[in-house]
């Protein structure tokens, strides 16, 4: 039987160059979730791809979930006829009123509160970190800054204000439109960009609730200093966290990035939240059929540090070797997982729901038994998916086959570590009926075989079920 990785892969696709064949190939290479980046993607084109994914899932050719990554609130410079060239040591002005620009080096910034939020000696970062400038003086109409390096500033470049509590909306008009699109088209996960405070997450939750879409999982992207300062609150309110190392690495000293990645991951472990490690994991494979040794080590170490998902961005969206990139990531994950042995009893997790205690006991006991009896797999039955989330949070050393009768729950479980979800049409009168049905399906499809040892976890309370329970089955 083919090895099954426990760490999930998110692959970004472009709505311009993606098709059915590529989606199937990505799935076969190890992709679990397809990501659409709505900083660039168009709703009409994505809608067509979502129809293809639905058809592939319905036919059994794939079992893919979908993720919409919002553009988020941002600050940018204005449009320019020609690039603004600045040399190290040059003083130039940044205006918030475009009509006041006079000198060739004057630039516009669309953040209305710039003049009141920045202070002397503060650093302003322009063009995704390519230009750093120090504030020399703040006047009633502009900010004078000193360039700390040479750069040419083009149109609509990103501006970062590290250390500033920005007065930006949690959800922009575009984000709201895209989230409503996600609801309408049954997208499973929303990655919320430039989250700064837990209130931003609550705002998205409220929008989902208004449209009866609370099943959609919210992944908060940590990509600025303000989010780091409010990390615990953001983690508590979110279903998962993306360590967005690209933008985060612009806002903080890049030498501190690994430390902050570890802090973010540890906070997620504490609250049992899913972790996604993103940005440049296999960046060189955009152009090369092979990764660098450092990239392989990055993926390997992310797995050793117990991330739930690793993400491919340009590698699969615009790269020359999208399928090879995904297969390479799968190969490295499988190798790393051979050298992990999670000690569940040492994990102390604080879940943010009131009814988690019994699930914690079921999960910890089941995983302890699985390790002790050297089980081959774990079989789990769940209505809401919450038991699967708890089991996943304890980082099982075994693949978990999770059966549910709710398609939305199935899709939400696809991004959980070690959880491989399947649909069951209805629960039987007795739990043993569900066990037999599930095991027959798994055996006929080559997931399990005779002679293997399976741990069964069930907390479905229907019919004459006696739940919850944990048991050992010898096939």
Image (cartoon, helix red, strand yellow):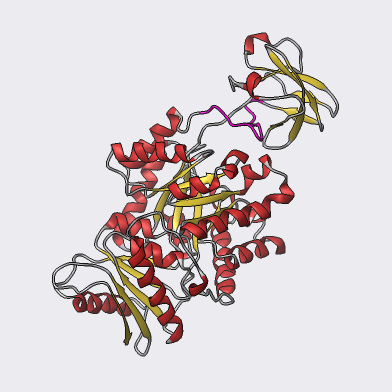
Percent coordinates x, y for residue 126 in the rendering: 69, 31
Front residue (pair 34, 340): 340
The main secondary structure of the magenta stretch is loop
At a point 51% along the width and 60% down the height, the residue shown is 269
Front residue (pair 409, 138): 138
Q: In the rendered image of this protein, does residue 306 appear above or below residue 54?
A: below
At a point 60% along the width and 53% down the height, the residue shown is 320
Which quadrant is the C terminus positioned in?
bottom left
Query: Would residue 350 appear left or right of 85 to someone viewing this image?
Result: left
Percent coordinates x, y for residue 92 in the rendering: 78, 19
**Quarter location, residue 209:** top left
Numbered range of the magenta stretch: 155-168
Q: Magenta stretch: residue 158 in it?
A: yes
At a point 50% along the width and 59% down the height, the residue shown is 270
At a point 62% along the width and 57% down the height, the residue shown is 262
Front residue (pair 205, 445): 205
Report how many numbered discs are placed on residues in the image. 0
Front residue (pair 343, 422): 343
Q: Is residue 175 visible?
A: yes
Q: Magenta stretch: residue 327 in it?
A: no
Q: In the rendered image of this protein, does residue 449 appear above or below residue 141?
A: below
């Amino acid at each position: 039987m083919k090895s099954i990785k426990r760490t999930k892969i998110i692959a970004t696709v472009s709505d311009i160059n993606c098709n059915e064949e590529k989606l199937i190939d990505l799935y076969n290479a190890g992709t679990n979730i397809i990501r659409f980046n709505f900083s660039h993607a168009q709703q009409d084109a994505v809608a067509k791809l979502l129809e293809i994914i639905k058809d592939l899932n319905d036919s059994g050719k794939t079992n893919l979930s979908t993720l919409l990554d919002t553009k988020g609130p941002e600050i940018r410079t204005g449009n320019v006829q020609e690039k603004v060239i600045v040399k190290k040591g040059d003083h130039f002005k940044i205006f918030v009123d475009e009509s006041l620009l006079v000198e060739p080096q004057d630039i516009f910034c669309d953040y209305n509160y710039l003049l009141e939020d920045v202070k002397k000696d503060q650093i302003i970062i322009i063009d995704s970190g390519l230009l750093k400038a120090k504030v020399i003086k703040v006047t009633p109409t502009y900010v004078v800054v000193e360039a700390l390096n040479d750069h040419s500033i083009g149109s609509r470049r990103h501006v970062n204000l590290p250390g500033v509590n920005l007065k930006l909306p949690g959800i922009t008009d575009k984000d709201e439109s895209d989230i409503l699109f996600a609801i309408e088209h049954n997208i499973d996960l929303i990655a919320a960009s430039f989250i700064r405070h837990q209130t931003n997450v609550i705002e998205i939750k409220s929008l989902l609730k208004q449209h009866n879409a609370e099943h959609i999982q919210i992944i908060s992207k940590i990509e600025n200093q303000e989010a780091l300062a409010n990390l615990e609150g953001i983690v508590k309110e979110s279903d998962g966290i993306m360590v967005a190392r690209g933008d985060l690495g612009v806002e903080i000293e890049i030498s501190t990035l690994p430390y902050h990645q570890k802090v973010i991951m540890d906070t997620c472990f504490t609250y049992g939240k899913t972790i996604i490690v993103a940005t440049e994991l296999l960046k060189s494979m955009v152009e090369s059929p092979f990764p660098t040794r450092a990239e392989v080590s990055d993926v390997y170490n992310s797995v050793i540090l117990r991330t739930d998902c690793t993400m491919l961005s340009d590698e699969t969206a615009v790269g020359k070797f999208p399928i090879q990139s995904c297969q390479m990531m799968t190969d490295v994950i499988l190798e790393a997982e051979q050298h992990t042995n999670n000690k569940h009893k040492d994990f102390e997790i604080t879940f943010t729901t009131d009814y988690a205690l019994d699930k914690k006991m079921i999960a910890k006991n089941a995983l302890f038994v699985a390790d002790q009896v050297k089980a081959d797999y774990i079989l789990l039955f769940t209505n809401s998916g919450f038991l699967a989330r708890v089991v996943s949070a304890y980082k099982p050393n075994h693949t978990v086959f999770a059966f549910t009768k709710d398609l939305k729950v199935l899709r939400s479980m696809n991004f959980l570590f070690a959880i491989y979800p399947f649909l069951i049409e209805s629960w039987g009168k007795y739990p043993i009926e569900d066990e037999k049905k599930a095991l027959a399906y798994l055996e006929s499809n080559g997931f399990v075989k005779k002679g293997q040892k399976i741990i069964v976890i069930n907390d479905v309370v229907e019919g004459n079920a006696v739940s919850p329970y944990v048991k050992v089955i010898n096939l």
